[in-house]
Image (tube, rainbow, N blue to C red):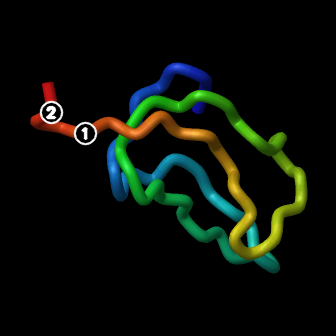
Amino acid sequence: MTRGDVIKEGQIIGWLDQFGTELPIEPDVPGEVLELLIDDGEPVGFGDPLIAVLPSFPGIN
């Protein structure tokens, strides 16, 4: 995942390792990745933001 990538709601964009179990990371909104807020291997807590997304709103011109 890099800056500028377009993601879809529910798309698996990464994996989180929790005590040897890999959990999928899925965005709750579609849009464009603006910034990765953590580095690979960095510890995170529940509710920590992982990426900044510019939401897209289909059907709005």
Give the camera-side residue of 61 and 5. 61
Name the residue at 86% across, 50% down.
41
Above or below 42: residue 18: below
Distance of label 1 from label 2 (alpha carbons): 6 Å
Q: Estimate the x, y position of residue 57 in percent, counting from the top left.
A: 25, 39
The reply to whether discs 1 and 2 touch (Cβ–Cβ < 8 Å) is yes
Q: Estimate the x, y position of residue 28 in percent, counting from the top left.
A: 42, 59
Q: Is mark 1 on a helix, strand or loop?
A: loop
Q: Could you tell me how many numbered marks the image carries?
A: 2
Above or below 18: residue 31: above
Quadrant of the drawing holding the C terminus:
top left
Find residue 57 and name its label: 1
Q: Quadrant of residue 19?
A: bottom right
Q: Estimate the x, y position of residue 34 in percent, counting from the top left.
A: 59, 28
Q: Is residue 6 left or right of residue 39?
A: left
Q: What residue type is labelled 2?
A: Ile
Q: Estimate the x, y position of residue 6 in percent, counting from the top left.
A: 40, 29
Name the residue at 46% across, 54% down.
27
Which residue is at the far front?
61
Above or below 60: residue 27: below
Find residue 60 and name its label: 2
Name the residue at 35% across, 44% down.
30
Above or below 22: residue 38: above
Find residue 27 and name its label: none
Name the residue at 45% across, 30% down.
32
Q: In this view, does 14 lie to the left or right of 60?
A: right
